[in-house]
Amino acid sequence: MASVAIASRPRAARRPHHARPIPRGVPYTMRLPDERTLFVEVPARMAVRDRGGELAFTPEGVEFLDRLRALASEVGSHPSPALIATLRRALGFTQEQLGKRLGVHKLTVSRWECGGLHPSAEAVSRLRALANAAKRTGVIVPECAGAHA
């Protein structure tokens, strides 16, 4: 098994001409804010080795790991704009779809994600319930490319 350093956010790398592709998935361990540990195998297309042989993730790989972290993390009483946006994408929703699920307008979701507005306690409770339901039933993390809306 390959040794991978744990970082708060994995290092992203473009795929320059000198980067060597990884032949198979990369085992990766991430520590969640609540001290749980998540083990995942990152698809090979999302990782490369640089000239020095160090492991680096492509932007797609970083987005993949961010989505997994958002799904596995607990939604607190004051979720950050980044968590709301990442969780929405991880669940495969557009802003409009999430807004309908939470009983708010899509512009409200947009304002939450931009940090211009904070979700009400009721909206946070609904968002938490949605995330918890996804954890119980499972969710397929959508392909990273093209899921930004």
Image (cartoon, rainbow, N blue to C red):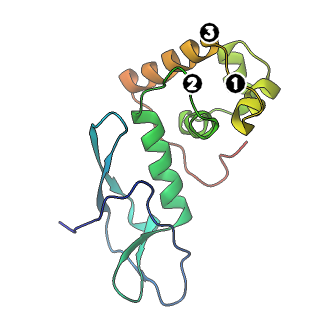
Q: Left or right? Give the position of 53 relative to 143.
A: left
Say which quadrant the N terminus sits in: bottom left
Q: Residue furthest left?
A: 1
Query: Are circles 2 and 1 on residues that touch, CB within 8 Å?
Result: yes
Instruction: Report, in whole angstroms, how far the alpha carbon at label 2 lies from the one at label 3.
Output: 11 Å
Q: Specify the label residue 118 is tagged with.
A: 1
Who is closer to the viewer here, 22 or 52? 52
Query: Are circles 2 and 3 on residues that touch, CB within 8 Å?
Result: no
Q: Residue furthest top?
A: 122
- Where is mark 3, residue-wise? 122
Who is closer to the viewer here, 39 or 144? 39
Instruction: Report, in whole angstroms, how far the alpha carbon at label 1 lies from the one at label 3.
Output: 11 Å
Task: List x then y, in percent, for residue 111.
Answer: 77, 31
> Tag 3 or tag 2, which sits nearer the N-term?
2
The residue shown at (48%, 60%) is: 61
> Tag 1 or tag 2, which sits nearer the N-term?
2
Look at label 2 and name its amino acid: His
Look at label 3 and name its amino acid: Glu
Secondary element at image label 1: loop
The residue shown at (52%, 73%) is: 13
Task: List x then y, in percent, for residue 141.
Answer: 48, 42
Say which quadrant the C terminus sits in: top right
Q: Left or right? Give the position of 137 relative to 119.
A: left
Report the number of numbered marks.
3
The mark lying in front, picked from 1 and 3, is 1
Q: Quadrant of residue 7?
A: bottom left
Who is closer to the viewer here, 9 or 19? 9
Secondary element at image label 3: helix
Q: Specify the label residue 78 is tagged with.
A: 2
